[in-house]
Image (cartoon, rainbow, N blue to C red):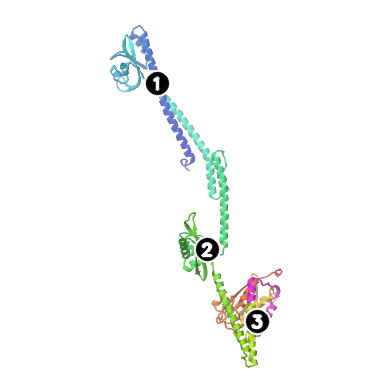
């Protein structure tokens, strides 16, 4: 930094200019004072000399010319004397080449004329020409009236100011020298004082820059106990308070960031012009879906989607939050836009809450479908029970065989209703988490062979081959054998019902160190349409849209299967190709023996 641009340079220059101005004014006043003082002394001396000459002349009885000659010698060479009687010069001690002055020039002067007319003493500084008329000389003239031999005469004394000017010049040089020394000393003192004042300010500037870089532990040393020291104390207190506030703001920001990141709903804050300020991960997923569907690149866009801006315009008009919905990439999103205000009533932007309501919409649909499905599943057996019961009551059957057939149908339908109700109860217990699992250590080989052997008869009747493929004959696993048997029973039963004659069903066991026990139920049946794969584990969902009796079942088996596997902390999936077969795979994680 340049010296003149710093506090040191400015304070130094200010003190120097102020002291220089004072010294210059003081020098001018002193010079003027000494000059006036000397002139006044010369005038007083000349006046006293003139009075003495008049007194000596009046008292002396000798020749007046001799007296005046003696008096002129006594007053010295620097002082000249002229005595006039009206227009005549009685005596003059001025040589021809010294001063060019005549009685006429004296009487023509307005001030000196008062000696003649008013008979009063006159003092005057005037410029006189030398004897050659080439140069003007400054001189002091004192005129005094004189009574000589009964006549009125006038005495004029002249003294040149050359000696006084030399004295004034010497005095001025001395004063200027003293002023110069004073200015030099002032310069040194001002620079020293400025440096002392600026040193703590430099420390404060360095500390301020360090704090601006985030080093809030920087302290300003307290070098003095004056106002600058108090400023340093206040600066350190400000540093502490600033550090506390920054830490508090940082914690609050981290707290809000954590809240936003952990929220299931998306949050977007944006300015009035649509510029995005803050988002959280769910909101980013929404924005990615929006820009992908519109064919834009998310990285190149910093503005909120148009649907949010439209809601913001509505909220700005109505001065309250607005609600909307949109479907993107097969998912439903609920939108809530609320305006944000400044300290006044001006709207500066908005906050948008974005909620993925796809599951809610799906659950609403499933809830509606559940009621319809239950009604449909119960209506058929109830109708059949009612119809055949009325036939028996009305004695419509003509033979015992017909009555037994009707009774058998009523019995079968009641069993079907019982199975449906039991499946619903099991599913409700599983989904509510109230079903307890009884873990046991189960030999996998004998367990799977026993279950598949139960289906040997039905499979043989349909001409289907069923087999068990084991990766490890000696392996044992911890799970609830009754519930897993229920899973396998559902899966194998489904495979038999959907596999045509001549097909095959394989129950495959394999293990993975990372994933656990894996069991596949693979068939070569008709397969599941691609559009139905996402819904096979939903309650009452059937690929057979006609919902005919027989092989369609209740539609709850796979929902129960999925809940049983979930209760074991496992995972189930399905892969299928139409007319090529279906494979259901479920994984059971490894459970420690003390987890029973």
Report, in whole angstroms, how far the alpha carbon at label 1 lies from the one at label 3.
146 Å
Q: Secondary structure at mark 2?
A: strand
Kindly identify which residue carries mark 3. Answer: 467
**Badge nearest the viewer, 1 or 3:** 1
**Badge nearest the viewer, 1 or 2:** 2
First along the sequence among labels 1 and 3: 1
Percent x, y of residue 445: 69, 77
- Residue in view at x 53 percent, y 38 percent: 196
Per the picture, the main secondary structure of the magenta-coloured stretch is helix
Report, in whole angstroms, how far the alpha carbon at label 1 lies from the one at label 2.
99 Å
Up-down relation of residue 545 to residue 596 (above or below): below
Up-down relation of residue 142 to residue 9 (above or below): above
In the rendered structure, find residue 140 and report the number of the disc placed on it.
none
Kindly identify which residue carries mark 2. Answer: 353
In the rendered structure, find residue 40 and report the number of the disc placed on it.
1
- Residue in view at x 55 percent, y 70 percent: 360
Q: Is residue 483 visible?
A: yes
- The segment highlighted magenta reads 424-451
Nearer to the camera, 51 or 450: 51
């Amino acid at each position: 930094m340049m010296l003149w641009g710093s506090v040191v340079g400015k304070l130094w220059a200010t003190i120097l200019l102020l002291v220089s101005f004072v010294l210059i004014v003081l020098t001018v006043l002193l010079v003027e004072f000494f000059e006036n003082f000397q002139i006044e002394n010369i005038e007083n001396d000349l006046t006293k000399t003139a009075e003495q000459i008049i007194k000596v002349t009046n008292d002396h009885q000798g020749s007046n010319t001799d007296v005046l000659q003696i008096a002129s010698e006594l007053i010295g060479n620097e002082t000249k004397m002229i005595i006039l009687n009206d227009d005549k010069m009685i005596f003059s001690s001025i040589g021809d080449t010294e001063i060019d002055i005549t009685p006429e020039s004296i009487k023509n002067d307005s001030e000196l004329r008062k000696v003649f007319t008013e008979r009063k003493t006159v003092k005057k500084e005037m410029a006189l020409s030398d004897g050659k008329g080439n140069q003007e000389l400054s001189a002091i003239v004192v005129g005094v009236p004189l009574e000589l031999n009964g006549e009125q005469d006038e005495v004029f004394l002249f003294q040149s100011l050359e000696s006084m000017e030399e004295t004034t010049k010497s005095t001025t040089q001395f004063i200027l020298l003293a002023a110069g020394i004073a200015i030099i000393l002032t310069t040194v003192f001002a620079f020293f004082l400025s440096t002392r004042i600026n040193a703590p300010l430099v420390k404060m500037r360095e500390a301020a820059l360090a704090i601006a870089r985030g080093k809030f532990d920087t302290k300003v040393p307290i070098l003095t106990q004056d106002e600058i020291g108090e400023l340093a104390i206040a600066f350190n207190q400000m540093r502490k308070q600033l550090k506390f506030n920054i830490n508090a703001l940082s914690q609050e920001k981290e707290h809000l960031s954590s809240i936003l990141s952990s929220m299931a709903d998306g949050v977007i804050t944006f300015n009035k012009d649509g510029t995005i300020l803050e988002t959280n991960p769910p909101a980013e997923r929404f924005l990615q879906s929006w820009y992908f569907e519109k064919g834009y690149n998310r990285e190149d866009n910093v503005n909120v989607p148009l649907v949010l801006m439209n809601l913001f315009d509505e909220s700005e008009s109505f001065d309250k939050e607005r609600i909307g919905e949109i479907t993107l990439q097969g998912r439903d999103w609920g939108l809530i836009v609320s305006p944000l205000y400044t300290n006044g009533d001006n709207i500066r932007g908005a906050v948008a809450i974005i909620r993925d309501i796809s599951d809610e919409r799906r659950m609403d649909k499933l809830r509606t479908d559940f009621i319809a499905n239950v009604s449909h599943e119960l209506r058929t057996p109830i109708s059949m029970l009612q119809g055949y019961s009325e036939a028996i009551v009305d004695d419509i059957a003509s033979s015992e065989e017909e009555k037994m057939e009707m009774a058998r149908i009523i019995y079968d339908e009641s069993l079907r209703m019982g199975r449906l109700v039991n499946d619903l109860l099991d599913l409700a217990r599983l989904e509510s988490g109230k079903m307890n699992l009884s873990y046991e250590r189960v030999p996998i080989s004998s367990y799977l062979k026993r279950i598949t052997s139960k289906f040997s008869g039905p499979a043989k009747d349909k001409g289907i081959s069923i087999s068990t493929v084991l990766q490890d004959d000696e392996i044992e696993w911890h799970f609830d054998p009754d519930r897993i048997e229920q899973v396998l029973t559902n899966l194998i039963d489904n495979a038999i019902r959907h596999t045509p004659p001549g097909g095959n069903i394989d129950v495959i066991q394999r293990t993975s160190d990372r994933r656990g026990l894996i069991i596949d139920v693979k068939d070569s049946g008709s397969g599941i349409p691609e559009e139905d794969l996402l819904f096979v584990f939903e309650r009452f969902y059937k690929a057979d849209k006609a919902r005919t009796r027989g092989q369609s079942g209740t539609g709850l088996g796979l929902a129960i299967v999925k809940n049983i596997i979930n209760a074991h902390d496992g995972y189930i999936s399905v892969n299928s190709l139409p007319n090529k077969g279906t494979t259901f795979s479920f994984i059971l994680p490894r459970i420690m023996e003390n987890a029973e």
